[in-house]
Image (cartoon, rainbow, N blue to C red):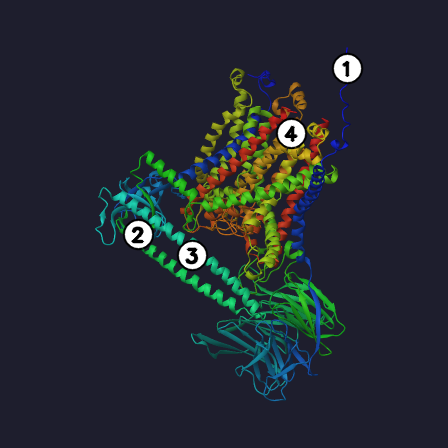
Amino acid sequence: MPEAVLPPPTRAPLPQRYETARSTLWWDRFMNRFITVGGVAIITVVLGIFVFILWQVLPLFRGATVQTLQVVPASDTAEYLALGLDEYGEMPFLLDRRGRLHFVELNRPGQHRVHPLFPEDNVEVTAWRYHPGRQELLCGTRDGRLERIEIRYRTVHGGGERRLDPDVQVQLLPALARPGHPVRAVDYGDSGTDKLVALAQEVEGRFEVRAALLTQTRGLLGAGQVRVEATFDLTDQVPGRLTHLLVNRMADAILMATAEGEILYFHREGRALRLRQRFRPFKDCLRTEIVLMDFLLGDVTLVLGNAEGRVRLYSLFRPGAEGDRVFGRTKQFPDLAGPPAFYCASQRNKAFVIGQGAEVRLCYATTEKVRWHTDLEVPVQLAALNSKYDRLVLLDAQQNLRVYRLEDPHPEASWRAFFGRVWYEGADRPRFEWQSTGGSDAFEPKLSMVPLMVGTLKGTFYAMLFAVPVALLAALYVSQFAPPEFRGVVKPTMEVMASLPSVVLGFLGALWLAPRLETRVPSVLLILVLVPLAALAMGALWSRLPVVWRARVRPGYEFLALVPVLGLVGLAGWMWGPVLERWLFVVTDPATGERVADFRLWWPAFTGADFQQRNSVVVGFVMGFAVIPIIFTLAEDALSNVPATLRSGSLALGASRWQTALYIVLPTASAGIFSALMVGLGRAVGETMIVVMATGNTPILSFNPFSGMRTLSANLAVELPEAPHHSTLYRTLFLGALLLFVFTFVINTVAEILRQRLRDRFKTL
Amino acid sequence: MQGRGPWQERVRAPGEPWVWFTAVGLTVGLVMILGLLGLVLVQGLKAFWPRRVVEITLKADTSPQFRGSRVLAGERVLERRKRHPAVEVAGPSEDREWQLFLGNKDVYGQAFRFVDVADVERVRMPSGLLRLERTEYGPLLAYPVALESPGAEPLPAEHPAFLATLQQRIEEAHQRRGEIRRLEKKEIGELNRQLEKLHWRLRALERRQAGGGDVSAELAGIRQRQRELEAAYETLAARARELRAAQERDRLVCRLPTGEEHRVPVGRLLSFYAPNDLGWFGRLQVFATRLREFLTQEPREANTEGGIFPAIFGTFVMTVLMSLAVTPLGVVAALYLREYARQGWLTRAVRIAVNNLAGVPSIVFGVFGLGFFVYVLGGQVDRLFFAERLPTPTFGTGGLLWASLTLALMTVPVVIVATEEALAAVPRSTREGSLACGASQWQTIQRVVLPAAAPGILTGLILAMARGAGEVAPLMLVGVVKLAPELPINTTFPYVHLDQKFMHLGFHIYDLGFQSPDSDAAQPMVFATTLFLLALVVVLNLTAIGLRNHLRRKYASGAF
């Protein structure tokens, strides 16, 4: 045997052979890092939605910030009576006792312009009033002269810069005052065509009060002649001395405060002036005399202060359903330490600046909140806000003008405005109200979330009322009684139902269903009663049939037998609805006096609540399409995941299938069913398009099933496209979104935790 | 027959009626969904089916006349019981009324009218009546009398070649309309775009000039170019005017059912058919034509006529963009959660949170999209790249990109959850096998795990697309509009216009149903659109369900 030839020795394996390719390693490392970083980033971003929305909402709850910009000395040592400001807060002016206007240029310190209002030098202004909104000043003098001054600012461009140029126009008012006697109070209101002047003059220690109605015709060639339409002498009606006199801008009210602390409200209608109301705002206080009386923006709310430092707001409203609008107390602010010394109302919102001594407060009337306050070193005499509401100017006792930058973008926002009752101007009591936009400048946005939350709850309630029984019964039937083949058909069908776009549901609900249901409410009621009864009756009948017959139908196929019967019963209910209506819902039509069988008329007559075509019943039914499949799927999962051993044991012990389902399966799966309900609730709360389309979207506080509502989500869809970026409304809508987010998130989390608990429990069974 | 259960042993099982009672729930649920699908199917298809036109003669003495005539013709849309709420109801025959679609809105001022059945003396279906679709005022229902052309003898309707000639003229007009459209949209549009570009350059130069730079030469060049463009515009506009005049030349003379004579320029006619002379097959043809036009044409007359093509296209583009954004986001996040993150309480909490985001109302995502994408991101993009156009926003307003991203964010939880489930379903042994063979982690994921999970991921994606395609509420905030015939993808640079607003099927339904000036006339269109959207969503969902079931079977058999 030849020597076996040994195979050549194999080469020792190269160590490189076992090395992984560099590119593979690199890719692996890169992808590992990429996925980790990317995954964390994506999850952070997704969860950051909450943070972003919160961040948009937070500025609503900040107070005002006020920063000192400059301190400018006012020119001389004159005694200043009034302080006014231009739109940009660049050129304040001061009125002094000798009837001169001092314009102070803040951009060029030290530059003052003095503008005398009267030709003579020895004038003494004894009565004055400045309307910042109209930039109109009224002056009455010791010798009985009366002037109305309009202060306009012209923007002049020159030398590469912009400067303001004041333009003062003096208009003599009709000779209402008796010459030679000091004017003690004067005011003027101008509604365009009608102008009302009122003044109080001291004649030999006695107050004479007169008013005049002026009219101005407006022709094609501009404003026409002013003529005196009527004069009124109110002296006899005014007891004693007057401390304050106001005329509103609608020129239909004169308000006077007497030295005894009584306010008289004269109302003008046409050419008649009539005393409408007398009241004592500080009747309950130690010192009743009125130190401050002035209007808030819109001239329907009075800001009143007494010598103790009490600050109260009185507004015009109708106390009953009918009658005249009179003043009534609506708000009270925290007391000042002493009598209010200065006051200035904002021309943009319901804010005002008030204070005494060295204390300055910025208050917001609607929300009854002090938004900012400070204590200066020096007492303050006068205050002014510009019309853009971003500058505050104070004149202190050392004759210095202090200029502040005011930042208060959301004065009307507060917890109370969103969640509490607020007494809005013109209302007879505090209310929850949502009305974000209105026609006039003086309109105050009403931003209560409560009607929206109630609307959301209402929609959810009616949706759940319908969806829960249907979904749970269906889940119970499919999981416990139906043959398993059923599941394979029913579950995908329900999933398709869950995916129906809500805009389709909303459209069908509003334009197809609502008009058809409107006249058929009795039919619906009848069907609601008849269908379950029919099913029960059929069940009872069935169980009495001989076994031979029953054995022909496989258990679980009852459903097929039920469909035609329920169809017939439903049809019968639909047809007999009008019969029921003619029998039960008969009402006498107030218009014709006829006896009429119409549920739409019967409902308001019987309950006092109104009936609308697009109502909560329709919404509840249509939302069922969205909610039923969700509850059904989750509940069915929970029920069919109950271990089969439990069911078998129960059946083996002789319990019927119903007993097993009711006493064994249902309690075991209860947590899962509850979780299903929660998820369904979350869906109903957030549903948007159905509610937008199938309700009238009126924000009302009522649980009437035949009226509409406005939900938080619908409110977002309706108002957000129109809300200016970063306005109060915009942020308030974000607050609505935040509420929705938090609510649904919490509900879903609870549901998820319950589900996981249940899963753990089944594992141990 | 199954084995004998306990319910057969006892004569009467307790609670048996209640079992029947629970069946009510299922019945109601199924009736609701099937009823809804059936309703939309029937009403949607009915919108295309040519109805017969009835001519109604009203009773001579009693009934109110219509435009001084006792005869009127229209499509019978609705027959309903007139509601007499009074307890004493009159005899049943007077109790019904018909809603007629009369057409001829420009002449009558209204397109619909109710007629009491009691007032009707005679109903017939007149032959020879035409239903003519027009570019405005909806269809015309009339008897043709003659075809007038300038400089030629009018062609009477009795002439055998009349209908063929009319058809030919309409086709000519259609071509001219296409020509006008091409001129105005493409050529004049192109000029406008160039002019606009020049305008922006001019503004930039003026700013430089204000800054002290000498740009007079460039300015003169631009002005010269502007003049040239304007001259070119004039030529094109003159041609368009000429074509428009030609559209008005031929006129169809017809007699309305009420007896009035009416002339309509052939240039305003789109198509016609004789509803009462069509056989079943002819009607089917009309049906198919109308269906095709609906799907391929642009809307007319405040969306109440014409087609929905821009809405389909907008929905499609937005859904595709959304899918492009949502797939990588969802898959990467799910991969991280399932394959990389340590499975502790934190991961569990994150999982629950992500899961719950799927339950947060869609409008909240819309609010976020508006606040963050549009105002924060869009505003920033505008300040950086489109400063010369400010204050007119380019990206700082709702648009295609922001809408897609918003919906992507809304649907990302769906994709994450589905992907995670699919990843979890890949057996551990598969992974370990791959790792044991020496594959790196990424290689395992790339070659083994992801392919195995792909159908599951696809299911999630399809579900997300279905949700995105049907969602309207967030889109209302971030860029959907009622009319945008300009498609977001076209032949002008940069081809895909991400900043453009777009139309959407869902919003189209909302707009037609609720913002339309004539909601009765719009209803067939709404139903047709609804049918289309519903079909889209249902098909997507059924695909997803089918895929999932297929997947379940695959894993159930335990292939590995």
Chain that bears disc 2: B
Chain that bears disc 1: A
Q: In front of the other: label 2 or label 4?
A: 2
Residue beneath the point at 35% across and 58% down: B241
Picture disc at residue B265:
2
Q: Quadrant of the C terminus of chain B?
A: top right
The image quadrant of residue A283 is bottom right
Chain that bears disc 4: A
Query: Where's residue B21, x and y in %?
Result: 55, 29
In the image, is residue A665 above or below residue A235? above
Picture disc at residue B188:
3
Q: Are marks 3 and 2 in contact (CB under 8 Å)?
A: no
Q: CA distance from mark 2 to mark 4?
A: 72 Å
Residue type at mark 4: give it. Leu
Residue type at mark 2: give it. Pro
Q: Are marks 2 and 1 on the same chain?
A: no
Q: In front of the other: label 2 or label 1?
A: 1
Query: Where's residue B313, x and y in %?
Result: 48, 45
Q: CA distance from mark 4 to mark 3?
A: 71 Å
Chain that bears disc 3: B
The image quadrant of residue B20 is top right
Q: Nearer the viewer, residue A8 or A590?
A: A8
Q: CA distance from mark 3 to mark 1?
A: 94 Å
Mark 1 lies on residue: A4
Number of on-image labels? 4
Q: In front of the other: label 1 or label 4?
A: 1
Residue type at mark 1: give it. Ala
Mark 4 lies on residue: A666
